[in-house]
Image (cartoon, rainbow, N blue to C red):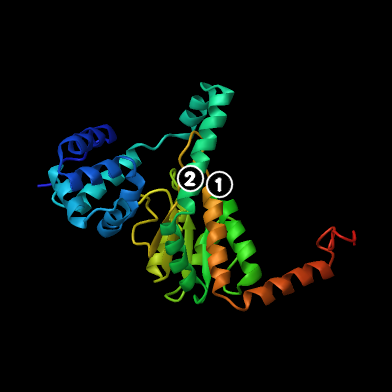
Amino acid sequence: MNAAIRSTEELRRDISEIVEGGSPQVSAFAAWVLDNYQEVAFRSLRAAAGAASVNPNSAVRLAKALGYAGYDSFRADIQSALRENFVPYSKRAHALTRRSGADTWESLRKATNANLAAAFSPGMRTLLATCAQELVTARRIYCIGVRSCFSLAHYFTYVGAMAFANIVHTPNEPGGIMDMVSQAGPRDIVIAITYAHYSWEVVRGVTIANECGARVIALTDSMASPVARGAWKVVPLPMAGPHLIPSLAPALSIIELLLAEMVLRAPDAERRVHDFEERIKRFRGYVLSDPTTGR
């Protein structure tokens, strides 16, 4: 029988007891879980055990010691706990007003460094390399994001389209996402970017993409995210910290890393970027085409 859904505090209490009293391997995995809820939420059984340097059986034994039928139900509770922990933006703003300037600065610095370390982890590189390999051979690549995530989607498509003919520019007019994604098919990939609060337009776009048979790469904050369900790949966005909204700086780094991995696999990318630059220079789109001469 599965354990009842636990709150974050209940999970932490119960897991901490196993850290203290479990067998060495199970205790080691339990200790790792306490510091890596997001990793548990996003990773498979084998991937999580590998990241914690324990045998997969130890992960299953932890789940059963906590009263779950298996690892999947344990992971589902972790996902629910993370969803429960969502902090509204207004409360984030309120929390910032209660901090000192020096404390805020230091907390933001530490959180940003930790987020970027996660973005540049070996596991992330492997995941992005897998995505890049399929993206460069896709018929069309669509990237959708609205509100704060529009800038990320726009950056990916604007910069990416310099090097790749199969990238479709992100729409900015009402209804544009549905119009665009409804044209997708099995040879296309839709990159969806959203986090809590999850934007309705992006969630609806992913639903349409799935119905059209396109593969979805979800850049999101949790496996509990509605765009993660049924996605071909889920790219976890490390967004922790006392920011006014969840931090987008690591998400931009991940997009830059993904573009770099794509260029590594595309011999024609250099020529296309060169041709793009020459067109803009020809029509004086840059104020200074050559900063060394001022012309």
Could you tell me which residue is drawn at 66 percent across and 74 percent down?
270
Rendered position, 129 above or below 149: below
Rendered position, 288 above or below 247: below
Place of residue 15 in the rendered image (x, y in percent of width and height, measured from the top left): 22, 38
SS class, disc 1:
helix
Could you tell me which residue is drawn at 49 percent across and 38 percent down?
111
- Residue denoted by label 1: 249
In-front residue for pair 279/267? 267
Disc 2 residue type?
Asn
SS class, disc 2:
helix
Place of residue 113 in the rendered image (x, y in percent of width and height, measured from the top left): 51, 42
Q: CA distance from mark 2 to mark 1?
A: 9 Å
Q: Tell me the number on the disc at residue 147.
A: none
Rendered position, 215 above or below 222: below
Q: Is residue 97 left or right of residue 276?
A: left
Disc 2 crowd rating (10 Å Cα; few below 14, some 14-19, many 20+) is many
Which of disc 1 and disc 2 is earlier in sequence?
A: 2
Rendered position, 114 above or below 265: above
Q: Is residue 108 left or right of residue 48?
A: right
Q: Is residue 258 left or right of residue 206?
A: right
Disc 1 residue type?
Ala
The tally of labels here is 2
Residue 260 at least partly seen: yes
- Residue denoted by label 2: 115
Q: Are marks 2 and 1 in contact (CB under 8 Å)?
A: yes
